[in-house]
Image: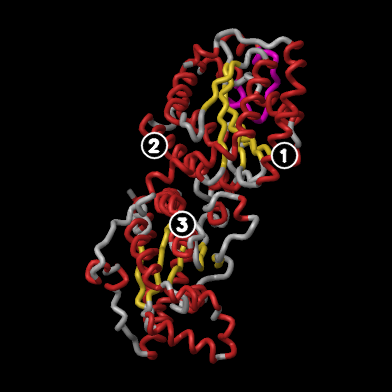
C-alpha cells in the first residue's frame, strides 16, 4: 500500500502559487455553502508518521479557511473525567455541528495504533476495536457528517531527516525518546497501519494516502480533496441515504403480519395489569427498598460503578411518580435526572445520539433518563418525524451505544411502564379536573392516544430488537401506581446487588 506514496511527487513553488488562489476561493465557497445549508458537517482526521507535518498541514488549512467555522481537537492523554466514561465519549463531545468543519489529529485511531504497536492489545482486540470504529463512522455518515481521513506518509530517509530537525511537542507519539523510537518502530508501525487502513477504508469514510515529503504537494492535495468534498457534500449525503434506504423499504426488521387479531399480539399483551398491592404493604416495602437502595448506591460510588436508568412508557403511566420515589432514596450528590422531549434546533445540528452521549455521568454516579434515545423508534417513528431508514437503523445504533456503556462498566436499567387504554383515559380526565395536575395533560397527549395501536406495535419491536443481555427491558405493570413503584425499585436493587457482588467476586479472584 505505502509503495504508492513513494513516487517522489512534488509541486514547485511556482505551480503552488499559481494554483493557490483558485483553491482558496473554492474552499471558501464550499465552507460558506456548508454553513448556509446547515445540512452536513465535515470531520477531517489527520494521521500519519511522526515528522510528516500534521501540524504544518493543520495551520495551512486554518490560513485557507475561515477559522470561525473551524475547530481542532487533539486527543492527548485522557483527563480524569474522560477516563471515568465510555471510551468514545470524548469523541462524541468533539463532533462538529452541522454547517461546521472539525479537524481531529489522530482521532479515534491514534491511541489504538500506538497500543497495537506496543503490543498492549492483541490482534483480535485490534480487529474488534476497528469494527467499532467502522460502526461509528457509518452511523455518523448517515447522520450527515462527511468524514475524510488523511494518512501522511514519508519514506524512511525523509522521515529521519525531518525528525532530526523537529522539536519535541506534546503530540509526540513515543514520549521522551520519541525520535529514535519512531524510527525503530517504523516498519512494525506501518504494518499495523496498513492493516488498520484496509479494515476501515469505506465509501462513507475513505482513507486518503498522501505523500508528505514535499509540503506544497501534501497541502495542495489535502486542500483539493477537501474542496471537492465540500462542493459535493449535499449530493453525496443524499446518495448515501438513498442507498441506505434500499434495505429498509419493506419496514426494517419487522415482519409483515397477517391481519388476524391473534397474529398481532404484542409483548405488552402479556403484562399482567391485575397486579395490586395494599397501601400499608406498599409503605413498608417502599421504606425497606429505599433504605437498601441508598446503601447500594453509595457502594456503587465507592466501586466506581455507574448506573444509567431509562424510563419509557405510556403518557400518564406514572413515570414521574416512579422517578420521584427512586430519587428520594438517593443522595443528591450522586445522581441527576434529565428529561427529554423533541430535540432543539441546536441539538438537530448533531448526530441523533449526541445529546444522550454528552450526558453520560462520571464513574460511580447515577443518571435517570425520563424519556431517552428510544424516542427515535417510538414517537419519531409513529409520528413520521424520522423516515423509515433513520428509525430502522436506530435499533442497531442504540444497541451499540448501550453495549459501549456496558463495556465501560455502566449498568443500564430500562423500564417500560404499561397501562391499559382505559386506565390512561381515566388518568387523563383526572388531570384535567385537578388544578395542580392540569399542566400534565396536553393536546399532544390526546393525539398520541389516538395512535395507540401504532405505538403498541412500535413498543413491541423496540423490546424485541433492543432487549439485549447487557441492557434488558423490564416491563412494569403500572395500572396500580403503588405496584409499579415497588417493581421499579425492586428491579434496581436486584440489578445493583448482582453487579456489585459480581465485581467483588472478580476482585477476590
Q: Of residues 49 and 46, which is closer to you in this image? A: 46
Residue denoted by label 3: 305
Q: Residues within 10 Å of mark 1 (few under 14, many from 20)?
A: some
- Classify 10 Å Cα crowding around label 3: few (below 14), some (14-19), many (20 and above): many
Asked if the stretch drawn in magenta spans residue 288, the answer is: no
Task: Say left or right for 124 vs 161.
Answer: left
Q: Nearer the viewer, mark 3 or mark 2?
A: 2
Q: Nearer the viewer, residue 393 or 331?
A: 393
User: Are the residues at dot 1 and dot 3 in contact (C-beta closer than 8 Å)?
Assistant: no
The residue beneath circle 1 is 32
Question: What residue appears at the point 48 percent right and 32 percent down from the top-left corner?
Answer: 203
Residue 469 position by quadrant: bottom left
Instruction: Report the mark closest to the observer, 1 or 3.
Output: 1
Is residue 173 inside the magenta stretch? yes
Mark 1 and mark 2: Cα distance apart in space: 38 Å
Q: Which residues are magenta?
A: 162-178
| Above or below: residue 342 compared with residue 158 | below
Q: Is residue 387 visible?
A: yes
- Where residue 227 appears, as percent x and y from the top left, is 65, 29
> How far from the left and from the top, in percent, is residue 266?
29, 68
The image's colour scheme reads secondary structure
Asked if residue 271 lies left or right of residue 70, the reply is left
- Label for residue 128? 2
| Of the image marks 1 and 3, the number of the one nearer the N terminus | 1
Amino acid at each position: 500500500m505505502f509503495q504508492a506514496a513513494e513516487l517522489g511527487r512534488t509541486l514547485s513553488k511556482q505551480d503552488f502559487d499559481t494554483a493557490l488562489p483558485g483553491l482558496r476561493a473554492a474552499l471558501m465557497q464550499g465552507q460558506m455553502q456548508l454553513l448556509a445549508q446547515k445540512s452536513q458537517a465535515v470531520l477531517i482526521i489527520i494521521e500519519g508518521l511522526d515528522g510528516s507535518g500534521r501540524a504544518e498541514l493543520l495551520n495551512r488549512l486554518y490560513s485557507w479557511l475561515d477559522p470561525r467555522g473551524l475547530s481542532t481537537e487533539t486527543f492527548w492523554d485522557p483527563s480524569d473525567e474522560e477516563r471515568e466514561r465510555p471510551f468514545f465519549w470524548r469523541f462524541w463531545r468533539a463532533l462538529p455541528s452541522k454547517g461546521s468543519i472539525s479537524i481531529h489529529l489522530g482521532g479515534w485511531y491514534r491511541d489504538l495504533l500506538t497500543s497495537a504497536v506496543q503490543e498492549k492489545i492483541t490482534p483480535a482486540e485490534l480487529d474488534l476495536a476497528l469494527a467499532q470504529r467502522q460502526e461509528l463512522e457509518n452511523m455518523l455518515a448517515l447522520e450527515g457528517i462527511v468524514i475524510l481521513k488523511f494518512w501522511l506518509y514519508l519514506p524512511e530517509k525523509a522521515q529521519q531527516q525531518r525528525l532530526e530537525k523537529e522539536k519535541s511537542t506534546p503530540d509526540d507519539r513515543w514520549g521522551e525518546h520519541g525520535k529514535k523510537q519512531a524510527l525503530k518502530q517504523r516498519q512494525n508501525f506501518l504494518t499495523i497501519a496498513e492493516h488498520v487502513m484496509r479494515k476501515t477504508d469505506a465509501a462513507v469514510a475513505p482513507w486518503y494516502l498522501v505523500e508528505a515529503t514535499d509540503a506544497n504537494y501534501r497541502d495542495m492535495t489535502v486542500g483539493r480533496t477537501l474542496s471537492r468534498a465540500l462542493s459535493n457534500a449535499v449530493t453525496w449525503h443524499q446518495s448515501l441515504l438513498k442507498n441506505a434506504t434500499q434495505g429498509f423499504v419493506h419496514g426494517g426488521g419487522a415482519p409483515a403480519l397477517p391481519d388476524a387479531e391473534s397474529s398481532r399480539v404484542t409483548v405488552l399483551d402479556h403484562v399482567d395489569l391485575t397486579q395490586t398491592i395494599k397501601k400499608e404493604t406498599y409503605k413498608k416495602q417502599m421504606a425497606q427498598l429505599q433504605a437498601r437502595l441508598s446503601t447500594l448506591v453509595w457502594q456503587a460510588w465507592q466501586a466506581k460503578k455507574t448506573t444509567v436508568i431509562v424510563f419509557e412508557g405510556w403518557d400518564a403511566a406514572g413515570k414521574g411518580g416512579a422517578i420521584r420515589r427512586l430519587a428520594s432514596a438517593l443522595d443528591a450528590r450522586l445522581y441527576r435526572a434529565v428529561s427529554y422531549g423533541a430535540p432543539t434546533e441546536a441539538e438537530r445540528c448533531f448526530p441523533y445520539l449526541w445529546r444522550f452521549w454528552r450526558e453520560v455521568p462520571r464513574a460511580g454516579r447515577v443518571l435517570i433518563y425520563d424519556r431517552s434515545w428510544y424516542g427515535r423508534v417510538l414517537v419519531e417513528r409513529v409520528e413520521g418525524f424520522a423516515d423509515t431508514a433513520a428509525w430502522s437503523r436506530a435499533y442497531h445504533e442504540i444497541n451499540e451505544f448501550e453495549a459501549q456503556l456496558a463495556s465501560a462498566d455502566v449498568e443500564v436499567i430500562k423500564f417500560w411502564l404499561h397501562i391499559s387504554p382505559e386506565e390512561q383515559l381515566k388518568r387523563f380526565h383526572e388531570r384535567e379536573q385537578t388544578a395542580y395536575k392540569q399542566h400534565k395533560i396536553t393536546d399532544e397527549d390526546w393525539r398520541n392516544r389516538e395512535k395507540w395501536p401504532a405505538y403498541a406495535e412500535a413498543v413491541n419491536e423496540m423490546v424485541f430488537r433492543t432487549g439485549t443481555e447487557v441492557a434488558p427491558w423490564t416491563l412494569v405493570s403500572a395500572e396500580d401506581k403503588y405496584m409499579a413503584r415497588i417493581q421499579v425499585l425492586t428491579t434496581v436493587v436486584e440489578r445493583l446487588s448482582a453487579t456489585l457482588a459480581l465485581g467483588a467476586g472478580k476482585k477476590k479472584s
